[in-house]
Each structure stands twice: as structure tokens, then as C-alpha cells.
Image (spheres, grey):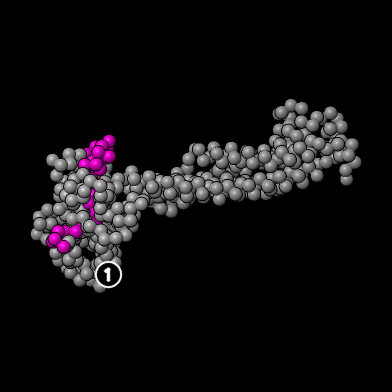
Amino acid sequence: MKFIESIRIAMRALAANKLRSVLTMLGIIIGVGAVIALMSIGRGVEKFVTDRFTSLGSNLLFVVPGQLEAGHPGTGGRINPLTLEDMEVLGDRSQNPDVRAVSAEFFTDATISREGKDMQATVSAVTPSFSNVRNWPTVIGDFFTQEDFDERARVVTLGQDVYTELFEPDEHPVGQTVRINNMAFQVIGVMEERGGGPGGNEDASVFIPLTTAQDRLFKRKTVSGGYQVSVIYVSVMDSDRIQETQDEIAATLRARRGISYLDDDDFSIISQNDIISVFGEILGALTLFLGAIAGISLLVGGIGIMNIMLVSVTERTREIGLRKAVGAKRRDVLLQFLIEAVTLAVFGGIIGIILGIIGAKAVSNISDSFSAVVGVDAVLISLFFSMAVGLFFGIYPAVRASRLNPIDALRYE
């Protein structure tokens, strides 16, 4: 019997039991749809996180106090803090020629209030270069200047969430007054919306001069009187020289902080690639895990195909006997039942792919900043796997049908 004829007979047999065929495909449809949707959402989250860290600034390095590497318990003991003077030294091009610009930040939580409204927000005490180094402009007004910094001015630039919470939609904030821990500050601008970052929601922040924060508001200077900072941001001239810049910074800080040759650093230098790599590994593993869980549905769907095909063999025993009696060979019967099983799996896989893509797009439409990534590889793998499931779980029923004795089959009631 020709292959085309086997396909025609298989299609006719499936069409004769439409409802049963659809119910048989349901497990495959759900499994493939879940795999596509979950893997697309997982990759979308990975891309979202990568884009977020990339948006922090161009070729950015983070210098933080203490050792963050595995095997160094320095973060658990007394940490030698970084200071504004450390930032100024790192910005010296004669010592660090690959550094384009530097900025520093000290952050803590505080209550922000205005006209009876108040909220908890992060106070980011920063240097004037922060907006440029972090690639984070204002959309209303301006960021504070070097003059504001030197004069310890009580000026503040608001994050988007703080602005939305404390002001009416049509109200112009520049020139207005807000209170930080009950101290009055004049609003000079509003930052561009940024969303989530390494420290949480960055839009729920306000930005004031570092000198103002530590001389007037928080009193968090070091023992020697230096301005303490939580992190130093270093913008690198050339992305191809990230590692060389890290070495320059490490050598400069070791010399400044008097660290001997054999002692470990009391600071850590982290690149965007380091952070993206760690998050990428975590999210990649999570995506595979979600895909594997969804793949269990494919296994269940395959078992459903095998059960229905076994029932089909029983119901069509006399048909099989008749076909063998008129000359059909064992391989013809085997091929027909395999085609039926694979067809159920493939059609179920195609429908599942369509539903999975629709589901992923629906999740993307919920948020303007998040978009699921539907990969061609995920689609092809799902389709191939559904074919493999149909073939694997269709073999036993097909072999059983092909081994029926024609005389016994014709006598079957």
C-alpha cells in the first residue's frame, strides 16, 4: 500500500470520530501551549532585566565597600566605607586614563511629605554628575548643579512615583516645596521614568546633593570627617577596556586605602556584564524549569494518545482482519496507525503553538515595559517534540494492530 493511501485512510478514520480526536489532542495542545507561553515569558523577563541594567548607563562599573565574591566573608564584618574623596581620586584621569566620568551615591529611606500627603521613599544623596553617568535625564526642570552641591542647597529632584503621589496631574512641581524628614526642600525637577532597578523601584526616589544630606539631614560622615557613600559609579571610556579599567581602579583604591600586596581588597568592583550574567543564568535556569514543568503536560498528552489508539485498535479489529485478508501487509497496518498517532500529535502541537503565542502576547499587553519573546527555536522544538510524542506513544498500539491474526480478527465481536 502506498504511503499517500495510508495517510488518506488514517485521516478518514480520525474524521469519523471528530470529538474523540479533539479530546485526544487536548493534552498535546495544553502541553505545547504551556511550553511556548512559559518559555516566551521567561525569555521576556530575561530581556527585561538585561535592558534595565543596560539602561543604568553606558559602560558602567559599580564600586562598593566590602568583598562580595564567594569565599570572602568581608561583608559580614566591619566594612571600611567608601568616601567622596575616593570618588574624586577615581575620577583623576592622570591615574585612571580609561575613566570617562564618576559619580557617587549615598541612599537611605525617609518620609517625603507635602500638604498633608506623605510617603516612604528612598533618598539618593548624589553628586551633580549622577544624571550624566547613570544616563538618567530629567523630564521636568533640571538636576541640581555643582553650585547647589558646594552650597549644600536644600533642593530636590523627584522620581516619577514621588511626583505622581504628591502632586496633581496638571500641577507644575518646579518651585514647590516638599519636606524630607520634616526638613523643607525646593523642587527643581522630575526624573524620567525608569522603573525597577538593582535596588528596587528607582522611581520611588528623590535626589538631593550629597553634601546637603550629610551636613544637614542624616549626619553620616566617616570618623575622619569624609562624606560616606554607598556606591561609586564609574563610566568607562571604551567598552573594550572594561577589564583594564577595573584593574586601574583596583590599583588606585588599594594604594589609597593602604592595602598591602598579600591582603584582599576591602571593596568590590562590579561590571554591568557581571550583573547581567548572574541574572541571565538564574532566569535561564528558571525558564528551562518552567518549560520542563509544562513538558509534563506533553507526557500526559502522549499517554492519552496511546490509550485512545489502543481503544481504536480494539474497535477496528474486524476492519484490520478484513484488510489483512484481502492482501494488506503487516507494515501497511503498522504505518496507518502510526500516521494516525503522529497526526493527532502534530495537529495538537500546531494548535498549542498558536494558543501559546496568543497567551504570550496577551501577557505582553498587560505591561507597556514588558514584552514576551517568542523564539523560533521554542516553536520548532515544541513541534518536533509533539511529533516525537505521537510516534513514541503510537508505536505500541500500531505494533499490536499489525500483529493481529486475520482469522482471529475476523471472528472478533
Please give the name of the residue rendered at 84% of the width and 32% of the height, measured from the top-left corner.
324
Please give the name of the residue rendered at 43% of the width and 49% of the height, measured from the top-left corner.
282
Observer-nearest residue: 293 or 203? 293
Name the quadrant of the N terminus: top right
Label 1 sits on what residue type? Asp
Please give the name of the residue rendered at 27% of the width and 65% of the height, measured from the top-left corner.
109
Dot 1 surroundings within 10 Å: few (below 14), some, or many (20 or more)? some
Observer-nearest residue: 194 or 275? 275
Residue 33: percent from left, percent from top: 56, 47
Q: Is residue 61 left or right of residue 183?
A: right
Residue 236: percent from left, percent from top: 23, 41
Residue 156 sits above or below residue 252 on the image: below
Q: Is residue 245 magenta?
A: yes
Residue 87 sits above or below residue 325 on the image: below
Return the residue at label 1. 118
Q: Is residue 388 left or right of residue 195?
A: right
Observer-nearest residue: 369 or 402? 402
Residue 272: percent from left, percent from top: 31, 45
Please give the name of the residue rendered at 42% of the width and 46% of the height, measured from the top-left corner.
281
Residue 260: percent from left, percent from top: 21, 48
Observer-nearest residue: 73 or 182? 73
Q: Magenta stretch?
A: 223-250
Image-quadrant location for residue 202: bottom left
Q: Residue furthest bottom?
A: 116
Q: Secondary structure at mark 1?
A: strand
Name the quadrant of the C terminus: top right
